[in-house]
Image: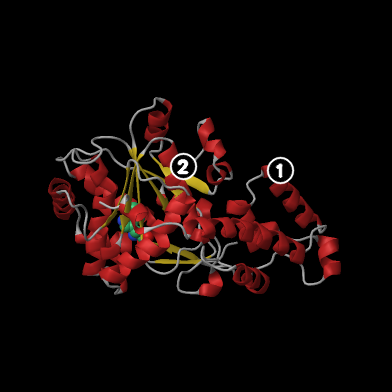
Amino acid sequence: MGKEFVVTPWDVSGNVDYNKLIKEFGLRELKGLPKVFQENVLFRRKIIFAHRDFERIVEAIEKKKKFAMLTGLMPTGKFHIGHMILAQQIIFYQKLGADIYVAVADLESYNTRGQSLEEGRKIAVEEYIKNYITLGLKPEKCEIYFQSDRSRDGEKSGAYYRLANLFGRHATFNEFKAVYGDITPGKMVSAFLQATDIMHPGLKEFSGRVPIVVPVGVDQDPHLRLIRDMTNRLKEPDLILPSSTYHYFIQGLKGGKMSSSDPTSFIALTDSAKEVETKIKKYAFSGGKDTVEEHRAKGGNPDIDVSFQYLRFFFEQDDKKLAQIEEDYRSGKLLTGELKKITIEKINAFLKEHQARRAKIIEKDIEKFLY
Ligand code: TRP
């Protein structure tokens, strides 16, 4: 829509033009993937839309060779439906046989957001890990770790922190500035740690020299570019450049960003049925027309309608049903209130089951994931 937008690891705002980002960042469009990817709504509907070096992962999957997946999370705020995009990819790769690594960026939230390590740990467990388990993550071949506490195994821990300190020589201050704009020592530490998160599964103490896929929001690509450059310069240990995939941001209820710090922008996985109803009715940005007459005559716009987007991202898995809703909305047959009602029912049916299963998780279940 021609409006200005910003996408950096520290700021996402405006109307993001994803095609422009592909060009600006030098990404490649994701297409021609093997059939298994079609089973996943996020790939099938191109919500995951771009990549770097994903061929290595496709090859590993097709030839049934070992590969790993690593991603990271900021342990701040509530776990909301936006976070499900990543959660579902983690579980998808686990089903495909990948070694799974999830970095809890507690040092990053300490250094860049002023949050204590203790608070970060609590949020990681209560908000993230419990919901991952409920969504289907299994403890086998899966390590969730804290940046501040990589492993109780001394060799593993040593290997991680050694790598973190080897990158320092392989980047210049100007490169950091070019990638981040406004740079602080805290951001620099976070960037080196993120490089270590992404590259360390390839060390012999972990999965060894295997391809690693890193699914992330497209705001994280500046990190990936810097990491690739540093890894190319680092001759020893010899590591394979990461493969990465990029997904769209899910829109916040009112349009714009879904932000953990604004409860009227998200649906949390712990929201009650009543809260969901109120939030969708009151806040969900509508692509409908102002009056029923006008809507019937001209139709609504599902492309900008937040309720429709939520159905498309997660809650209507059936392509035919989704296409019917889209068609009816565009033609004016389906009104905004009716579309919202469908969305509320779908979300609440999902949350009811999710919350019942989440309530059964105990301390012991969580410990199986921590190293
Ligand atoms: N910087 C990421 C964020 O802001 C968190 C993160 C830390 C991460 N290490 C990572 C993401 C490794 C992907 C891979 O959300």
Q: Residue at x 75, y 61 (%)?
A: 300
Quadrant of the rendered image containing residue 231: top left
- Which residue is rendered at x = 47% and y = 45% of the image? 50
Question: To which residue does mark 2 refer?
Answer: 92
Residue 247 x/y as whole percent: 48, 51
Q: Are marks 2 and 1 in contact (CB under 8 Å)?
A: no
Residue 174 versus residue 274: which sits nearer the camera? 274
Residue at 26% across / 43% down in the picture? 201
Q: Secondary structure at mark 2?
A: helix
Q: Residues within 10 Å of mark 1 (few under 14, many from 20)?
A: few
> In this rendering, would 231 be left or right of 4?
left
User: How many labels sit on residues?
Assistant: 2
Label 2 within 8 A of ligand 1 by Cβ: no
| Secondary structure under the numbered disc 1 in the rendered image | helix
The N terminus: image quadrant: bottom right
Q: Residue furthest top?
A: 63
Task: Give me the C-alpha separation between circle 2 and circle 1.
Answer: 22 Å
* Quarter occupied by residue 165: bottom left
Query: Given the image, on which type of amino acid does mark 1 rest?
Result: Lys
Q: Which is more foreground, mark 2 or mark 1?
A: 2
Viewer-proximal residue among 304 and 312? 312
Check disc 1 and report the residue beneath it. Answer: 320
Residue type at numbered disc 2: Phe
Where's ligand 1: which quadrant? bottom left
Q: Residue at x 76, y 56 (%)?
A: 330
Percent coordinates x, y for residue 338 in the rendering: 76, 62
Q: Position of residue 81 (x, y in %)?
A: 52, 60
Disc with the residue nearer the chain's start (2 vs 1): 2
Q: Is residue 155 left or right of residue 221?
A: left
Foreground pick, 225 / 371: 371
